[in-house]
Image (spheres, coloured by chain):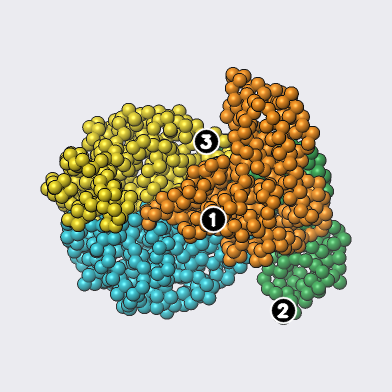
Chain colours: A orange, B green, C yellow, D cyan
Amino acid sequence: MFFASDNSGPTHPKVLEALVNANNGYRSGYGADAEMDIVTAQIRELFEAPDAAVFLVGTGTAANAILLATLTNPWDTIFCSPMAHIHEDECNAPEFYTNAKLTLVPAENAKMTPEALRISMQNEGNRGVHGPQHGPVSISQVTEMGTVHTLDELRALTKIAREFGSKVHMDGARFANALATLNCTPAEMTWKSGIDAVSFGGTKNGLMGVEACVIFDPEKAWEFQLRRKRGGHLFSKHRYLSAQMQAYLTDNLWLSMATEANARCAQLAQGLVTNIAVTFVEKPEANIIFARFPRHLHQRLLNAGANYYVIDGDPQAGDLDAILTARLVTDWSATAEDVENFLNIING
Amino acid sequence: MFFASDNSGPTHPKVLEALVNANNGYRSGYGADAEMDIVTAQIRELFEAPDAAVFLVGTGTAANAILLATLTNPWDTIFCSPMAHIHEDECNAPEFYTNAKLTLVPAENAKMTPEALRISMQNEGNRGVHGPQHGPVSISQVTEMGTVHTLDELRALTKIAREFGSKVHMDGARFANALATLNCTPAEMTWKSGIDAVSFGGTKNGLMGVEACVIFDPEKAWEFQLRRKRGGHLFSKHRYLSAQMQAYLTDNLWLSMATEANARCAQLAQGLVTNIAVTFVEKPEANIIFARFPRHLHQRLLNAGANYYVIDGDPQAGDLDAILTARLVTDWSATAEDVENFLNIING
Amino acid sequence: MFFASDNSGPTHPKVLEALVNANNGYRSGYGADAEMDIVTAQIRELFEAPDAAVFLVGTGTAANAILLATLTNPWDTIFCSPMAHIHEDECNAPEFYTNAKLTLVPAENAKMTPEALRISMQNEGNRGVHGPQHGPVSISQVTEMGTVHTLDELRALTKIAREFGSKVHMDGARFANALATLNCTPAEMTWKSGIDAVSFGGTKNGLMGVEACVIFDPEKAWEFQLRRKRGGHLFSKHRYLSAQMQAYLTDNLWLSMATEANARCAQLAQGLVTNIAVTFVEKPEANIIFARFPRHLHQRLLNAGANYYVIDGDPQAGDLDAILTARLVTDWSATAEDVENFLNIING
Amino acid sequence: MFFASDNSGPTHPKVLEALVNANNGYRSGYGADAEMDIVTAQIRELFEAPDAAVFLVGTGTAANAILLATLTNPWDTIFCSPMAHIHEDECNAPEFYTNAKLTLVPAENAKMTPEALRISMQNEGNRGVHGPQHGPVSISQVTEMGTVHTLDELRALTKIAREFGSKVHMDGARFANALATLNCTPAEMTWKSGIDAVSFGGTKNGLMGVEACVIFDPEKAWEFQLRRKRGGHLFSKHRYLSAQMQAYLTDNLWLSMATEANARCAQLAQGLVTNIAVTFVEKPEANIIFARFPRHLHQRLLNAGANYYVIDGDPQAGDLDAILTARLVTDWSATAEDVENFLNIING
């Protein structure tokens, strides 16, 4: 009953197996390994983008910060949701790598609305040399609230960005979970919808710590590589990142794992919705649920060994009927039994 | 016959085994894993430093840059050898993380001499607010030329740093190889010789990509953590770094691997010294040789499948008797047979 | 009828005279001029702060950015009003000098409310290493809307900052105008109310381009000097800044000029309040008015030669009855006749 | 007898007069003043560069750092002489503004030799993504040793820069003094010799603190303006910079002052050369002399009120016959009598 985070779960056995298989003899370092050539080809095929630049890094924060830096001037402002990981959870890494500013765009269900984005972009970047200029728009897909932008929503946002001459970055830490929800192609969810650069996350979905950075304009490839090295994110024994990503991309393992994680989340939601003591903050659309229920139910769950975050209070101290919010995240390794056990405790 | 780099070799089977063993169930992320607690205790015991702050990152460049940043103000200059990795091979990562400057101190055998360090520190930092101030001294142990500072040499350098109020950083990407040479304790090679912070390298010595950063003054611990996160170097699935480092530290695996690498280097040197066509640039003291011999011998080796860098010319084109320099690096997985084959080809 | 900005007006004749008087012979540079010794003594006496560090720079943006940098770590967030000059009008200079982030605190009349500041400081800096840490609070006095914090309001904000361990910066670009309004002492408006560092503005109040940076904790003095030099803001012929500031501080010229500017603003407000077509966005408290009135009145004024900013539309094109907002700023050199002329046109 | 620095002297009366004349009424700020339009036209005509971008800042450090930042990527290295002001005397301002590195090129008489520049550019930027890339070459004209590059020397250096794809920056803090020596046109000493951007210094030559930044490729104009504002170097009351520069450019005042300063330096050199106790470190070519003579002569001069720097020892303490080096700088306001007095003391 571990629903604290999808980056606390294990690595898929096929990924470990790929690491073992890659562990033979010597290999050129720093991305010049044969495995990386395969990964690049796989990603380009998957995204229907034969010219895309593809690079691997070890963390989602590195992926976001370096991608953003290739799209941003130091005198720009980056437009994102107030709940965006790049704003809330990266300890100023975007500011460090870009030396620019973030503008928080009002959002509903953690999704910037087109109207709010337009107003924000009108209000910033209109003071000539005195204020910041228009930098990129950054969209989290899945959002930090567990919602998923539809293709129409993505296109509405990227269209506005284009009007202001801005590029669009997608934080795809949970790219696979979003795609499993939308049931579209990676191309449709990215460049066909106006995305210029995307992190294709692996860490939260069964890898040890690998994210692919995909830039659809290959002119930025060399700059990305220099920024990656300068940030200390170019791995000498790069094959161990490539091997993981190769396994991830083989036989759609990435999508299978995300589909499984989403299914467990749906199972959890279906069980919770029957409980009249439980309300949802947002309709869960991928592998994250924000659910509100009384403290005594939290205590029952936690005391029985459930593991998740209560985000707005101490579940162990205070009025037993007070309503507190649980953040429940399922990963690829969550089992139907785990979910059932959890539901039996809260519903039983 | 792969002597191109010690970071192109494989991972030790015990390290892979540790990864497999760590791959069970859920674990708290971001360094709060149980494996990391063990690693911290292991390192503190190994370095006889019960209060030391210990953190893991994925690359040597990250280790150096973040450690230096905790010791440096943006208006300082860092003193290092002109051959230092932080100057030559990190694409301005130290400048990025510290925003400061590097002062290159004349060196012999890639080791700054005490006299040169003193003169450099006298000549910099003496112009009040107009020039840079005294930042830390950075020492590579093993140096980039394959030489090793004796304890006396370390102490002579750190003593001068102290006179100018400067801290001392050790780039220990090949820490284990240096220790295997000096046959001293880690404490003796670091804090007992005046080192304030050291990267304890694993990547070049049998790990996939893990370096331990050890700071002897624990007051800097929190700053290091913030700088690590801000640089995108805090791994969510941190257990996979911890597990590697734990295996590395268990039963002195780290020292055994370095001893083996050094032994292969010595075997190679002993075989080369008998060849009158070969001269050494430096006396090899760890696991790196710089050897000079005619182009026709390079061609014979390379055509037979040997893999190493020729650093001062094209081995395949030009006067066959021209002397070119080979950089030969042995790692833990190099075999005596490999070395023998290499020697048979060049000597035979 | 020039009410566009108080930094477009001329320099006071006494300031020019001081420049002429300072132009004799040679003088030590970089702040070591005799005039600067006098300025330091004057400021310390004026602020009743015998240990304060006092430095001059040429622009308000430099004063804010360098002062903030001495109070901020790169992993912090700075709390300020959404209308703050440091956010809106400095093209990311604070981000450049601090490498940190700004958190916008909801404000009324451009003044952060204590409640909003407390909530912002609770919501930021509570995610451990993942999010930014608590940096300083920055207060504009006069605000960008022309309002002035009372001493009670200042103390309420600085008290909250203290609870979170944060320092407080005051953007005093219009320090003199605020003091003329509050009729208190500089000490009361700064360190006695919990301010740690303040820019004492001269440029908007009759100097050519000089701001004094006052830091009440002298331990930061050397860091400020290094940051000033590193930012390119240490003037070699520093006497020409000192001489201006010395004249400004002599015989309370600074306060006389601000009092005059405020008086002209009050005259303007009194005349406008009688016009039923005019409403005020905020009650004018210093030397700035935001007034709303129909486009045809704007046209009448502008066509008669009045010079000011219309901030929310084109005064020359559109519905003549549409309401547009004027920003009217008076400086020390505005005359009662100018104001009267303006009022005659709009009211006549 | 003040020969300590040319930035300690007074401002020319015509410059003060221009300030007084500019002090009438209101003027648009931030560079939109009518005086600046004139300055831009004057500079374009003077440099025979009708498209050049022209901007003013208040300090030489700002001019160098911002110009370099427009020519440099953060992953580059800038090539300069070890004595360059940007390396020695700007407290890491170039590193702050560019976030890049400086490579010190061996120099003779403070002038990089073409051979040394070529070797440096060959040795840096040849390690792919691992090392820094080729950034601009920066040339000081006059050098910090008082020497002046001939046009042939400039062309030899810029030709090499071009071969490596690098731009060339000229630190023209003493541009006027160099031009007075070479007796060529500003165009010949800059773009006709391969210079891309130059600071046209005024501060050391009779202004209060104004440098013109001239960029021959106008595409960089907007970036320069953003970097200037972001660095806090855009003056609101900009007319007071423009007015000084306008006076400076009118009737060749800039060149007259430099010619006078150089003439006083030549007079000084001619008088010293007759003294057998005096030797020159470099042949003085502009307005700076480095001369070596015994301590007892230093004492005689200093005790008589001469003011200059002794750069390699304490003139008042030690062996009276020991040789110490004087740095003697003449500015526009130095008089023939001053020089004569100085010579009488040392020679008499």
Under mark 3, the amino acid is Gly
Under mark 2, the amino acid is Ala
Q: Residue C280 sits in which quadrant?
A: top left
Under mark 1, the amino acid is Thr
Nearer to us: label 3 or label 2: 3
Residue farthest bottom in this picture: B319
Residue D326 in view, yes or no: no
Q: In which quadrant is the N terminus of chain D drawn?
A: bottom left
Nearer to us: label 1 or label 3: 1
Question: Which secondary structure, mark 2?
Answer: loop
Q: For this rendering, which residue is in front, D41 or A337?
A: A337
Q: Which residue is mark 3?
A: C125
User: Residue at 50% across / 70% down in the picture?
Assistant: D166
Q: Is residue D230 above or below residue B189?
A: below
Both labels 1 and 3 in a single chain: no
User: Measured from the top left, where is residue B40 in percent x and y?
Assistant: 69, 36
Inter-mark Cα distance, 3 to 2: 61 Å
With C257 as the anchor, is D218 left or right in this view?
right
Q: Residue C303 sits in which quadrant?
A: bottom left
Q: Using a 10 Å C-alpha cutoff, classify the residue at mark 1 as few (fewer than 14 neighbours), some (14 to 19) or many (20 or more).
A: many
Question: Which secondary structure, mark 3?
Answer: loop
The answer to whether the residues at label 3 and label 2 have Cβ atoms under 8 Å apart is: no
Q: Which residue is mark 1?
A: A158
Nearer to us: label 2 or label 1: 1
Q: Is residue B3 above or below residue B12?
A: below
